[in-house]
């Protein structure tokens, strides 16, 4: 364990114990051998002296040998307290608030040399979410939309992710600061000619929309109600004194507003969840929301944890969690309530599950399960009685699994693995197995060597197999994509090894193919059965020289190839980037239409005009042979004094719609530069 090497005196003590055990064991072997020879000699002499006498010397030596075993067993046992009652030997059942306070004290005594006492308060705001629909004076949006339109670029089929621009084949829905703008984009009768403003939903309070879902029945708007109070205001609002984050007391809630699509977007119902949002997914009419509520800690004042139990509201009706709904992960910092909500949008029913622990950092959701990962610390209870030097912990990644049973969520399993996950694409569920890639790096987990791993775990989160040391020395994982029985992995330090890993047999994964090229792909996306699209950066002696778009040929798994690629070099465009490298939902891709479109922004400087930038959508067509052709760079304004940022593209039927913070413009997919119609987003 890591803390042994950080505490050499303790390590020396354990080595002495092991040496004593060895010597005592060796002496026991000698005693048994001597007793055997003595018994043999007595039989040869036909000497019998009654019952076999007890060998007190042998028992004494054996007892001395077993004593160190018990000590080491106690040392290696990982438990917070002998009185803790664990659920399935994995999750601790919480019974009251004082138990949480004791867990916090225990954790800090064992782990933390310093703790920044930040308080994030969560209380119901006086202002509710008020939405004022404003209908444009345009004609009624009659007619039907198209069934051929682009969905959000989701990771898992059937599991929707929220986005800031969505379409249903007739309307395009965009978030503009505190507004939801609904634009009529297409009808079968009039096609793109109908493009124009239809309705705006304006929020006149502190609610800030951040994401959207759309289906045949509901428009779901998710956002924050976020307010801060400074110390001067504290007395007026009756908030606790002395607990501030950089001098401010914060309140945050996640709001969900559900609109009836078939009844002209009238509000159907609303939810409010106290805390910060970790993530959200939607499976048909089930909405999953995960929030975090930070808990205070004080060694001087008594904290009433009842005031911080997760609370939610359904149409202003309040529901407060019970302690019996709370579970704790051993080894995690008990400073957060992670709450998993499952909403039935049809019945308004809410299922709530709560985890006491530290903040999580990556979320993956399949059609059947939720996987959330975060950091935990492994330690020994001897830390309470032995004066150990810092640090005394080993950090691992905990994987928490919840099952999705219709509209109910249930904690199922917990696993610990080495390293940390890069993003949600580091995880994938296939035929009941969880596949996950991690990196153990110097900067995050100590001074050891970098190790990239692939784990495969079964339904109970038992490790079935592990593939270590992926990539060359010094390289870290830059992107992962699982597709069926294969995993595609990119590592990077100065070159771009692209690995094809066969995971068909969960017990025996192996690297089947490898390709080494300059640069690296920060995002991977399947493009049909034969190709993998990579979006990232070109290489310049370990740095980056521009945005690179690659199409890997993966038909021969043993010999992957770069089928085609385009590099937009900084020397030609200035510093450039695409948001797809960190937000996959900004990518528009259609294999059937041979279409790839993504935002592209470049910055440069001239002595005449100073710093300037260009923002637009890069459009590419891919022919039947898998070769790129550049379709054009769609900008909404050139040389504008305003910052017209073009950030999203969607298609409906044969038309391409590009969205900026000011316009929605439409052209054909074949000729994206030929703008056919335009409307200003109000």
Image: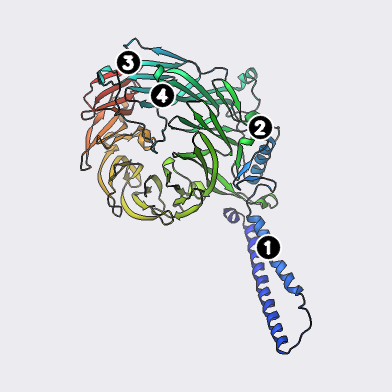
For marks 4 and 2, give the one nearer the viewer.
4
Decide: few, some or many residues near mark 4? Use Cα within 10 Å; few <14, some 14-19, many ≥20.
Answer: some
Q: Are marks 2 and 3 in contact (CB under 8 Å)?
A: no
- How far from the left and from the top, in percent, is residue 56? 76, 73
Disc 4/disc 3 C-alpha distance (Å): 17 Å
Q: Residue furthest right?
A: 50
Numbered tag placed on residue 217 in the rendering: 4
**Residue located beneath label 3 in the image:** 141
First in sequence: mark 1 or mark 3? 1
Q: Residue at x 34, y 51 (%)?
A: 500
First in sequence: mark 2 or mark 3? 3
**Residue located beneath label 1 in the image:** 68
Q: In this rendering, would 579 be left or right of 28? A: left
For marks 1 and 3, give the one nearer the viewer.
3
**Residue located beneath label 2 in the image:** 305
First in sequence: mark 4 or mark 2? 4
* Depth check, front residue: 183 or 88: 88
Disc 4/disc 2 C-alpha distance (Å): 40 Å
């Amino acid at each position: 364990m890591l803390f042994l090497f950080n505490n050499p005196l303790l390590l020396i003590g354990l080595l002495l114990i092991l040496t004593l055990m060895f010597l005592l064991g060796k002496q026991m072997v000698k005693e048994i051998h001597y007793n055997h020879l003595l018994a043999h000699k007595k039989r040869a002499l036909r000497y019998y002296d009654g019952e076999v006498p007890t060998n007190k010397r042998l028992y004494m030596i054996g007892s001395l040998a077993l004593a160190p075993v018990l000590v080491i067993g106690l040392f290696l046992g990982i438990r917070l307290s002998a009185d803790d009652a664990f659920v399935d030997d994995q999750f601790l059942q919480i019974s009251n608030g004082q138990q949480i306070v004791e867990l916090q004290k225990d954790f800090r005594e064992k782990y933390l040399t310093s703790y920044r006492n930040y308080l994030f308060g969560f209380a119901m705001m006086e202002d509710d979410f008020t939405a004022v629909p404003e209908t444009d004076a345009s004609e009624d949006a009659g007619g039907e939309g198209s069934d051929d339109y682009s969905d959000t670029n989701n990771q898992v089929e059937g599991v929707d992710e929220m986005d800031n621009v969505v379409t249903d084949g007739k309307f395009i829905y965009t978030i503009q600061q505190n507004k939801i703008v609904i634009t009529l984009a297409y009808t079968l009768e009039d096609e793109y000619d109908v493009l124009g403003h239809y309705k705006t939903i304006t929020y006149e309070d502190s609610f800030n929309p951040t994401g959207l879902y759309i289906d045949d029945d509901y428009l779901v708007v998710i956002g924050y109600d976020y307010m801060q109070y400074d110390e001067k205001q504290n007395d007026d609002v009756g908030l606790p004194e002395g607990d501030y984050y950089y001098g401010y007391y914060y309140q945050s809630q996640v709001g969900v507003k559900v609109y009836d699509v078939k009844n002209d977007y009238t509000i159907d119902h609303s939810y409010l969840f106290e805390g910060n949002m970790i993530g959200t997914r939607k499976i048909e009419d089930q909405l999953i929301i995960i929030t975090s509520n930070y808990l205070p800690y004080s060694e001087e004042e008594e904290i009433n944890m009842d005031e911080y139990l997760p609370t939610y509201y359904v149409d202003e009706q309040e529901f407060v969690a019970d302690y019996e709904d709370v579970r704790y992960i051993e080894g995690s910092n008990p400073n957060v309530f992670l709450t998993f909500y499952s909403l039935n949008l049809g019945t308004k029913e809410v299922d709530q599950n709560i985890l006491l622990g530290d903040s999580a950092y990556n979320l993956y959701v399949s059609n059947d399960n939720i996987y959330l990962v975060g950091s935990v610390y492994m330690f020994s209870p001897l830390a309470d009685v032995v004066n150990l030097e810092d640090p005394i912990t080993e950090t691992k990644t905990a994987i928490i699994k919840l099952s999705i049973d219709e509209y109910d969520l249930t904690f199922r399993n917990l696993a610990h693995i080495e390293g940390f996950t890069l993003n949600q694409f580091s995880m994938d569920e296939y035929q009941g197995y969880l596949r996950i890639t991690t990196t153990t790096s110097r900067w995050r987990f100590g001074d050891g060597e970098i190790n990239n791993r692939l784990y495969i775990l079964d339904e109970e989160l038992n490790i079935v197999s592990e593939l270590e040391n992926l990539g060359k020395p010094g390289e870290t994982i830059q992107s992962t994509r699982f597709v069926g029985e294969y995993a595609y992995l990119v590592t990077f330090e100065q070159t771009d090894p692209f690995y094809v890993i066969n995971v068909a047999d969960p017990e025996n994964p192996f690297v089947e193919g490898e390709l080494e090229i300059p640069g690296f792909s920060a995002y991977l996306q399947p493009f049909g059965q034969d190709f993998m699209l990579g979006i990232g950066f070109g290489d310049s002696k370990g740095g980056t020289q521009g945005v690179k778009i690659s199409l890997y040929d993966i038909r021969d798994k043993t010999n992957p190839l770069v089928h085609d690629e385009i590099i937009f070099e900084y020397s030609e465009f200035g510093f450039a980037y695409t948001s797809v490298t960190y937000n996959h939902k900004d990518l528009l891709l259609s294999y059937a239409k041979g279409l790839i479109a993504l935002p592209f922004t470049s910055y440069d400087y001239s002595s005449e005009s100073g710093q300037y930038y260009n923002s637009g959508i890069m459009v590419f067509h891919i022919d039947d042979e898998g070769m790129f052709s550049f379709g054009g760079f769609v900008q909404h304004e050139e040389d504008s004094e305003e910052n017209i940022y073009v950030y999203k593209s969607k298609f409906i039927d044969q038309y391409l719609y590009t969205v900026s913070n000011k316009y929605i413009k439409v052209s054909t997919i074949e000729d994206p530069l030929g703008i056919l119609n335009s409307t200003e987003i109000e």
